[in-house]
Amino acid sequence: MARDVSTSSEDQFVGAGLRVLAERGAAELTVRRVAEAAGASTMGIYTRFGSRAGMLEAIYRRGFELLRDALVEARDAAPAGQRILPLATAYRRFALANPPLYALLFERPLPDFDPSPQARTEALAMTFGVLTDEVPDPARAYLVWTTVHGIVSIELTHALRSPLPGFFIDFPAAGERLLLDGVAALLRGLPA
């Protein structure tokens, strides 16, 4: 039986949405499916978020919070001046552990959902800010992020699509090494 709307919190709905996303994929992020996963009524979603888009935006925001938390943990575990490669590794591990969430954050798996400009700005700032703490020049930080993001996204695409044997490189065995080598090469080539 569905819970009373008043007892269902935003966190419960967002957590249910993250579970639906992980277990069933983005196409199943419906108000009905998330409400069922939360053990609540669909009215609870509309009461808390106003619309499906509001619910999706809250899930999107939480996804970036989870990514930020993974990056902060990696950053804080590494010595100052040696944090960029651990950040790259944490970014990769997050993406590979959460492919549907990563897709929601950086791709558009739902054609009818596009986060608001404010949500995108806040979400990217909270994660990009972790990198700019280590690479203060925004242009250099952007180059590092796009290198990491590009390598990770390509690896994830290949992992999900099962490329032909012998195609390009052997993911996932070589994935982390390729990422670290690529970022290290970029850092060596960037002017101070």
Image (cartoon, helix red, strand yellow):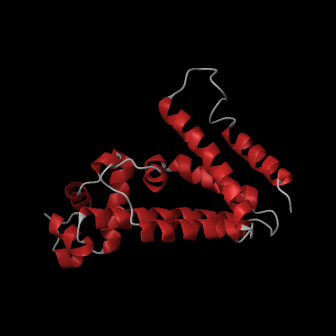
143 sits left or right of 8 in the view: right
3 sits left or right of 110 in the view: left
69 sits left or right of 120 in the view: right
Quarter of the picture holding the N terminus: bottom left
Residue at left 68%, top 65%? 131
Quarter of the picture holding the C terminus: bottom right
- Asked where in the image residue 113 lies, by quadrant, the reply is bottom left
Q: Residue 21 or 189: which is nearer the viewer?
A: 189
* Residue 5: percent from left, percent from top: 18, 74
Residue at left 62%, top 63%? 71
- Asked where in the image residue 6 lies, by quadrant, the reply is bottom left
Give the residue at the far top of this rendering. 165
* Residue 74: percent from left, percent from top: 67, 63
Q: Residue 74 or 100: which is nearer the viewer?
A: 100
Residue at left 29%, top 75%? 9
Residue at left 62%, top 46%? 150
Look at the picture and state if 37 lies above or below 178.
Answer: below
Look at the picture and state if 76 lies above or below 152.
Answer: below
Q: Is residue 41 visible?
A: no
